[in-house]
Image (cartoon, rainbow, N blue to C red):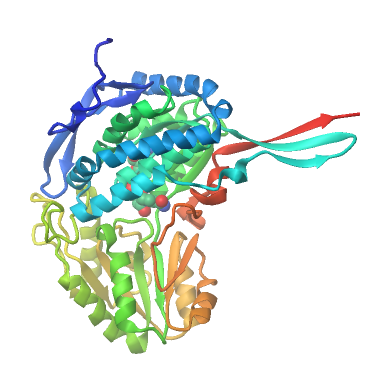
Amino acid sequence: MPAGVVNSASRFMAHPPLLRLLIGGKLLKGGSTFTVLNPATGKELLQCPSATPEQLNDAIKSASKAFTTFGSKVSIKEREKMLFNAADKIAEHSDELAHWLTLEQGKPLRDARFEVRATVDQMKLKQDTSVIDSKILRDTNKERATLVYKPLGVVGAIAPWNFPLLIAATKVSIAVLTGNTVVFKPSPCTPVTSLMMGSIIHECFPPGVVNVIAGGNDIGERLVAHPDIAKISFTGSVPTGKAIRKACTDHMKRCTLELGGNDPAIVLADADVPRAAKGIFSTAFANTGQVCCAIKRVYVPRALHAEFCESISGFAQAATVGDGQEKATTHGPLQNKMQFNKVTELLQDTIANGATVHCGGLPTDLSGAGGYHFPLTVVSGVDDESRIVSEEQFGPVLPILAYDTEEEAIERANNTRFGLGSSVWGTDLDHCVDVGMQLNSGMMWVNKHLDLPATDPFGGHKESGLGREGGESGLKAYVEEQMVLVRKA
Ligand code: NAD
């Protein structure tokens, strides 16, 4: 057995788990290691293997080779079977995955278990693949014209740190289902469960079909730049997404970009305030605000503003921020120091500009030395130009803004370079839809937010992204059309 190869799938469940890169069907050590922190303590969690540039090239080479005998030559049914098998294997390891997900990401164990279940569902996903079946467009005495959908080749998939396991499963499952092979790179902040997943599922696919590597941003850059990558599927921040789009033009790579958001929620005058406050609280502070399409600013009629602020603050005050391993914790820490500093800076700016802080406030220890815990905070008395309203906070500080007319609320909600999600809250559902249809976002919800069935297309308008993942458009983004014209006479 070559040096560094580990064949036993059971060893990565030790404490700490034996983490390995998955390259060409083999579980390998990296060229070096990097430190992964536990966000609840700010202390080292473990050392993670880091792929060398040569290992990245090996992964891409294996994926290219695997594509020649996978792609169009393995039926969708067989590919689905492989994914189902992988899902069952992940389910068998649910407890360990949830445990390490909490330790690396910070989310409460209950939420980690939910993410593992969603990961299993995602792998088992029964997408309507008939949308990528070949279609006869014309069949006459003279010619037959068929539209064929072909997989693209090797997909380079790159993820952020908020839902590491679910995003990994989403990208891997869609790539495989559509007949592509994949090299997946998690965030260096949260590589643990993605590598564990690679080890758990590595025997479910022919060698090289699924590769999982870990490393810093430089490995991501190299992955994007590699000429043998046919498509990049990226989830992360707007600036990185823009850099990736530029880098993709060189080889005319396809790319799907799922980027940041600054989702508005508009509460209408006929809304049931406590009900709307409850729904908005749960979807603004989910994952401690670290969700691309969490509610990040709320527009409320001036007459309801005080009642709404009081109601939503009540929910925030009843929450318990802490270590996700503690039973009582409802909201974990921010995932990393950079994010902790960013949210701190935004709240300092908000307070310095005279905002009212209804609950929460700055962390008592701004050094983050004891973990990146941040109080759930509700603010008002800020204007639309303030940083907390115009930037993506990606953390637990929610501005509540008063409005006088619906037209004004719609205009202010749309006055952003983001366009991921939006929602409208009220009693007259037809009117809610009328208002919501005027919002520019990839998803618009009424009386809910952040509901993302995996079979629906997901993606953003404007700078929130390009293309869709999931649904018909999501599947089509992983294949190329080919027109086949046969002359008969
Ligand atoms: P990020 O852009 O800093 O990093 C994301 C990933 O890209 C990481 O794996 C990183 O190593 C890699 N990377 C960094 N620079 C790169 C480069 N030049 N080339 C290739 N890869 C590179 O984002 P983050 O801080 O990890 O995540 C937070 C952001 O992600 C937020 O803006 C959030 O809204 C967004 N996000 C979007 C969605 C969505 O589906 N729209 C979902 C989750 C998070």
For residue 295, which quarter of the picture?
A: bottom left
Q: In the image, residue 126 lies at what x, y percent?
A: 48, 46
Viewer-side residue, 174 vs 59: 174
Outermost residue, top direction? 1
Viewer-side residue, 13 vs 427: 13
Residue located at (44% from left, 62% from top)? 421
Viewer-side residue, 271 vs 419: 271
Q: In the image, residue 114 lies at what x, y percent?
A: 28, 53
Q: In the image, residue 364 lies at what x, y percent?
A: 9, 62
For residue 13, which quarter of the picture?
A: top left
Numbered label tally? 0
Image quarter in which the N terminus is found = top left
Outermost residue, bottom direction? 303
Viewer-side residue, 428 vs 298: 428
Q: Quadrant of ligand 1?
A: top left
Is residue 162 visible in this depiction of the protein?
no
Q: Is residue 278 above or below residue 78?
A: below
Q: Is residue 311 above or below residue 254?
A: below
Q: Is residue 227 above or below residue 304?
A: above
Residue located at (51% from left, 49% from top)? 466
